[in-house]
Amino acid sequence: MNARSTYVSSLHDAEVRHVVMTAAAMAARALTGSDSSTDPEVRLKEMMDAHARILWAWGPGKPLTFTKFREMLTEDLSALLPNGVDAGEMSGFYAITGDGEFEEDSYDLEMEQRTVLEALEKASWNGRSAMGARVSDELHQTLVHRELLKGRSQESYCAWRSALIRTPAGPAGELRRLDLPAKLDEFYEPIRFDALYDQRWWFACPFCSWPMKITLHGEKRGSAGKVRCFHRPHARQGARYEFRVPDSGKAPELRPVGRPLKPEGNASVLFKDITDRMPEPTPEKGHRALVRGVWRCTTIPGIPELGLYDALSTPAVKKKGVVVALWPDMDTYDLLVTVTRKPGVRTEFKVDVKDYTYATLLADKITADRGDKGGADWLVVPDFRYDTVPMLEDVSRKWMRVATAGDFGARVCKEAGATWA
């Protein structure tokens, strides 16, 4: 198979997987009641729309009844792919959990599929989709990036992007003091319905400060509840809580569900210990939060970006000749780290930070882009994604070196003769 055929085949499969994943997620949200609509007719319409999209992906002559489609939503979603399409990242993925809840990782998978699809389309020979029309609308993240660039200065770009990372939610007055352009301020909306208790209280994740997901359960449905961050790694690191439903009108009191062990070695430097930080109930009135796409694409990956920047910008490290620049040339890549050991002798590290839930999709994007489009020579992933490093190293070795954030920080400090962990 020649290069052109390989690209067309990869692009076709990626597009079909994305169509199927988007449709399945839409239907799963409707089936589980996880969307904002409580109108059964609206939910049924969404499921019928999703069913039609699957039939389109399957093509003529391959029937799939609505009843069978509904049953398959609780199974491995790769079964919904047409014959001959590589299952890829969808193999073994379930959009509905064993508890009958919508799998929040569906959002990450669909979003990351879309990012890879865009990279494959750009890498194709004619820059066009193998199916013609685009299969998705423009991401909120793309719109945010355009607005950030309108500042026309490195200083404003860094200030605005840092604000979106450090303050993804808060009181309207505090958000106004961020002094964001009106178009960026529009990405802050009322607190989402599935992060509210009694339509009036919400809890901020101690890691990312975004509203956490709230669900009710118990023998008598609604007698107890769970709260966790929408970003699963944060939940695994301790942003998981439970509560008993309080008397009417009162806010719940959270109790932590276990505590993860603090990592040792290089990963300990950027680890945020939340043992003594119990989230407090915050009134919904007067508060806003970033839309999910901006939170997931800007705030979440921005946490290790700013974490590395802060850790490598301490006075002790600076004294060793380390200088860190955020998002050089308005995001050519994420970090430029320069180490000067003696006059005229310096080492540069050009860093791209990625936080993908599905590492195979990140590998696909790296391959399609032939490294990093901005010229980064280091790919850095959050410390909790350490198990993806070997696979990413195999894919990236022609273009970039790969490390966890903690190991990268240690590498820079070793070069400078400074202390990391």
Image (spheres, rainbow, N blue to C red):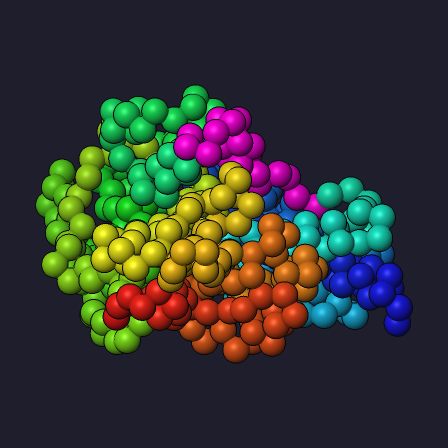
The foreground one among 334 and 281 is 334
Q: Is residue 141 above or below residue 90?
A: above
Question: Residue 349: where, in percent of width, then height?
Answer: 48, 59
Q: Which residues are magenta?
A: 135-156
Q: Is residue 2 above or below residue 41?
A: below
Q: Name which residue lies at 68% across and 64% down.
A: 367
The foreground one among 141 and 108 is 141
Question: Residue 256: where, in percent of width, then height?
Answer: 18, 62
The foreground one among 5 and 390 is 390
Q: Is residue 421 above or below residue 150?
A: below
Q: Name which residue lies at 84% across and 53% down.
A: 125
Q: Name which residue lies at 48% across and 58% down.
A: 348
Q: Quadrant of residue 16?
A: bottom right
Question: Residue 401: where, in percent of width, then height?
Answer: 54, 69
Q: Quadrant of residue 216?
A: bottom left
Q: Residue reaching furthest front?
A: 343
Q: Is residue 385 left or right of residue 390?
A: left
Q: Name which residue lies at 18% across and 50% down.
A: 279
**Residue 53 appears in the figure:** yes
Numbered circles on residues, count: 0
The foreground one among 103 and 219 is 103
Q: Quadrant of residue 258?
A: bottom left
Q: Is residue 61 left or right of residue 229?
A: right
Question: Residue 318: where, in percent of width, then height?
Answer: 29, 54
Q: Is residue 161 magenta?
A: no
